[in-house]
Image: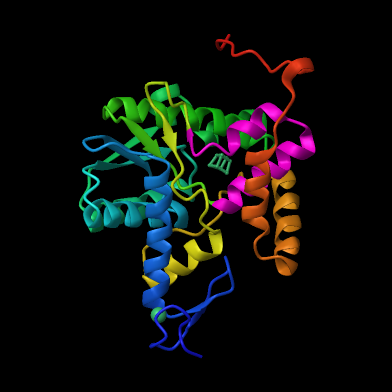
Amino acid sequence: MKCELCNTRAASIKRPKNQMAVCKDCFYLVFEEEIHHTIVSNQLFQPGERVAVAASGGKDSTVLAHVMTTLNKRYDYGLELQLLSVDEGITGYRDDSLETVKLNQKTYDVPLTIVSYKDLYGWTMDQIVKVIGLTNNCTFCGVFRRQALDRGAMLIKADKIVTGHNADDIAETVYMNILRGDFFRLHKCVEIMTGKGDALPRCKPFKYTYEKEIVMYAHFKKLDYFSTECIYSPNAYRGYVRELIKDLEKIRPSIIIDIIHSGESIKIDTTNVSFPKKMNCI
Ligand code: SF4
Ligand code: ZN
């Protein structure tokens, strides 16, 4: 079968996003161009900004570093890109994945800063788990991680943080928030840029990028990434939602984007709704 885009080369990939049969070269191009379109149409960056690329060594952040450096050069965004990693202190997981980030740093020739829970809070995740046991680990770790990224970004005087959250992650979060009736978070989770007026906005250039395509891109481009799951990660609830979406995807490939669009379109009559007030940490 010929590639449906160039009509010249043999098709070797069926795009999970729209089932189009394409050759590798056309796949790379449309994959990158769609992300470029997301960046430009949402005005994610301004020339001259220093952007911290949250890098964990996993597939999403590795592809993010690759695509951001590629597009920054190709379209002359004028961004100063830096890699920023958080070391949660999880033996056998994060120490290994950070080695991948160090490899990426050499490949893309951008500065790398690593901030650790141990230095910032005096505790590693391994020590926290010893105290609290193997439950709710992500609840603690998620809060620490968020703040660690902010502190790291402030340290390197970044203007923005980009994260590798992909369309599947966002669709799962939309679904979870609907199931929980958490409309405050539902609105927030579909925003492509959060904290717009704050000192450190966060952007998600992969908001409409399918996870399967990120894996394909990393695989065909032979990018170095770390694919082991965190040992404290079993997040049963998200896992069920993920399975549910995967089942729906079998009969309707556009379901991931459909769910994101639903999250964007749902409007709430706020007359009788009280949203949680923002409070300071006690
Ligand atoms: Fe932390 Fe959970 Fe991520 Fe592991 S999976 S690094 S515990 S947030
Ligand atoms: Zn082609």
Q: State the residue at coordinates (55%, 64%).
A: 212
Q: Position of residue 40 (x, y in %)?
A: 37, 46
Q: Is residue 61 above or below residue 85?
A: below
Q: State the residue at coordinates (41%, 38%).
A: 86
In this rendering, position of residue 224 left or right of residue 18: left
Q: Position of residue 250 (x, y in %)?
A: 72, 68
Q: Is residue 39 above or below residue 216?
A: above
Evaluate whether residue 225 shows in this view.
no
Q: Is residue 205 above or below residue 66?
A: above
Between 217 and 146, the one nearer to me in the picture: 217
Q: State the residue at coordinates (43%, 29%).
A: 148
- In the rendered image, the quadrant that contains the C terminus is top right
Which stretch did the figure color magenta?
167-193
Evaluate whether residue 250 shows in this view.
yes
The quadrant of the picture showing ligand 2 is: bottom left
Total numbered labels placed on residues in the image: 0
Q: Is residue 84 above or below residue 228?
A: above
Q: Judge whether residue 175 is colored magenta.
A: yes
Q: Position of residue 126 (x, y in %)?
A: 54, 37
Between 80 and 20, the one nearer to me in the picture: 20
Q: Main secondary structure of the magenta part?
A: helix
Please say which color scheme the image uses: rainbow
Between 213 and 86, the one nearer to me in the picture: 213
Q: Judge whether residue 136 is colored magenta.
A: no
